């Protein structure tokens, strides 16, 4: 299974918490009996619907619900890649009654369902890419499949094709309990979102809500909201340095672990000394610039006097300024 299943690979991350919140919202949005089948779709491609479908299904499975994710995008399927499984036999083979060898064969829908590495989570892949996905989804076989899987699973999530590019998801939306639209920040157009909503509503689909994906947020805001958001934050790095210093002062370095602490602390001290040298250099440059400016003022004052010849000795006021700057530098 790939790292795209962040709810499994990094369960304490802020993104995982967002998916748990999404699961809770879906559960309490409608009665459990009214929200068993869910369609996840988008307006156009590359908005992240497949990634969200996989992680949302994993979240339901982790809560103890027997969950099935159906890859209903029979044009550009991704779920079998995310879960690293064979794509055939799958949905298209069941609907067309043609096996992966191209021969006519009546296939049981449950025979195409495969368990994933996640407990309670199962996948029905898309199968072979057919020439007519929309026609297959309009057949009575899809209703037969939904009736069968709802008897065997608590939650069924469909990963549908983008609804503005093809009609596949629009067809499925009238058969499922709820539809969720996935959008992407600075990518999805508001007119496309309105058009997608109209298409689903026109066929009698129920839109449960919209997910805004790829929202830009700084790590600092994550740290403020989640105390375990990151293990590489500047605050934690500073605390590690302090701990290394304490260990350095209290240890006699009799073992390898203490030696590692000593080395890390010495590296830290080198970085700090470089920073101090850099700051001293900046101060010297500032003072030198001030001296040069004062010398220019002295020359201007000399030129403004009545003496035509070059005078090397500055006036008393200018000499006082120059001496004070040099004294500060020393």
Image: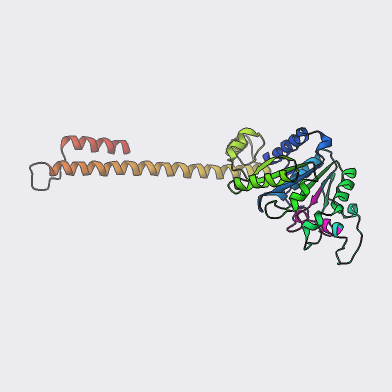
Coordinates of residue 117 in the picture (x, y in percent): 82, 49
Residue 266: quarter of image: top right
Q: Is residue 201 visible?
A: yes
Coordinates of residue 14 in the picture (x, y in percent): 67, 39
Q: Is residue 140 left or right of residue 41?
A: right
- Name the foreground residue: 298 vs 123: 123
Q: Is residue 107 left or right of residue 265?
A: right
Coordinates of residue 174 in the picture (x, y in percent): 78, 45
Relative to residue 32, is residue 168 depicted above or below?
below
- Name the foreground residue: 53 vs 226: 53
Give the quadrant of the C terminus: top left
Q: Is residue 236 left or right of residue 98?
A: left
Residue 165: quarter of image: bottom right
- Name the foreground residue: 314 vs 101: 101
Let me know if residue 72 is in the magenta part: yes
Stretch of the chain drawn in magenta: 69-93
Q: Is residue 243 visible?
A: no
Total numbered labels placed on residues in the image = 0
Coordinates of residue 27 in the picture (x, y in percent): 78, 35
Q: Is residue 301 left or right of residue 324?
A: left
Q: Residue at x 77, y 63 (%)?
A: 131
Let me know if residue 283 is in the magenta part: no
Q: Residue at x 20, y 37 (%)?
A: 319
- Name the foreground residue: 18 vs 323: 18
Q: How is the image coloured?
A: rainbow
Residue that protrudes farthest toward the bottom in the picture: 102
Q: Residue at x 86, y 47 (%)?
A: 146
Mostly what secondary structure, the magenta segment? loop
């Amino acid at each position: 299974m790939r790292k795209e299943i962040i709810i499994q690979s990094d369960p304490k991350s802020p993104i995982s918490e967002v998916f748990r919140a999404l699961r809770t919202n879906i559960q309490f949005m409608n009665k459990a009996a009214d929200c068993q089948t869910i369609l996840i779709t988008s307006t156009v491609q590359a908005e992240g619907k497949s990634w969200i479908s996989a992680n949302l299904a994993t979240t339901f499975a982790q809560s103890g619900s027997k969950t099935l994710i159906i890859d209903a995008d029979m044009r550009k399927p991704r779920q079998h890649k995310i879960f690293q499984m064979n794509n055939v036999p799958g949905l298209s083979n069941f609907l067309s009654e043609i096996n992966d060898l191209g021969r006519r064969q009546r296939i049981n829908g449950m025979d195409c369902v495969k368990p994933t590495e996640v407990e309670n989570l199962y996948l029905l892949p898309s199968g072979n890419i057919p020439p007519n996905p929309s026609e297959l989804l309009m057949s009575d076989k899809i209703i037969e499949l939904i009736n069968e899987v709802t008897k065997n699973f608590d939650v069924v999530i469909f990963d549908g094709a983008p609804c503005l590019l093809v009609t596949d998801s629009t067809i499925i939306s009238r058969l499922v309990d709820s539809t969720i639209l996935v959008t992407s920040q600075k990518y999805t157009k508001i007119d496309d979102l309105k058009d997608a909503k109209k298409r689903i509503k026109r066929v009698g689909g129920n839109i449960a809500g919209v997910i805004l994906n790829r929202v830009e947020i700084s790590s600092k805001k994550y740290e403020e909201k989640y105390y375990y958001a990151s293990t590489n934050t500047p605050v934690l790095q500073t605390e590690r340095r302090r701990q290394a210093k304490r260990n350095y002062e209290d240890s006699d370095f009799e073992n390898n672990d203490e030696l590692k602490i000593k080395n890390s602390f010495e590296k830290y001290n080198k970085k700090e000394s470089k920073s101090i040298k850099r700051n001293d250099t900046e101060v010297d440059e500032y003072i030198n610039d001030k001296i040069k400016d004062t010398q220019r003022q002295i020359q201007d004052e000399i030129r403004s006097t009545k003496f035509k010849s070059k005078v090397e000795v500055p006036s008393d006021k200018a000499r006082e300024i120059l001496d004070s700057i040099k004294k500060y530098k020393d």
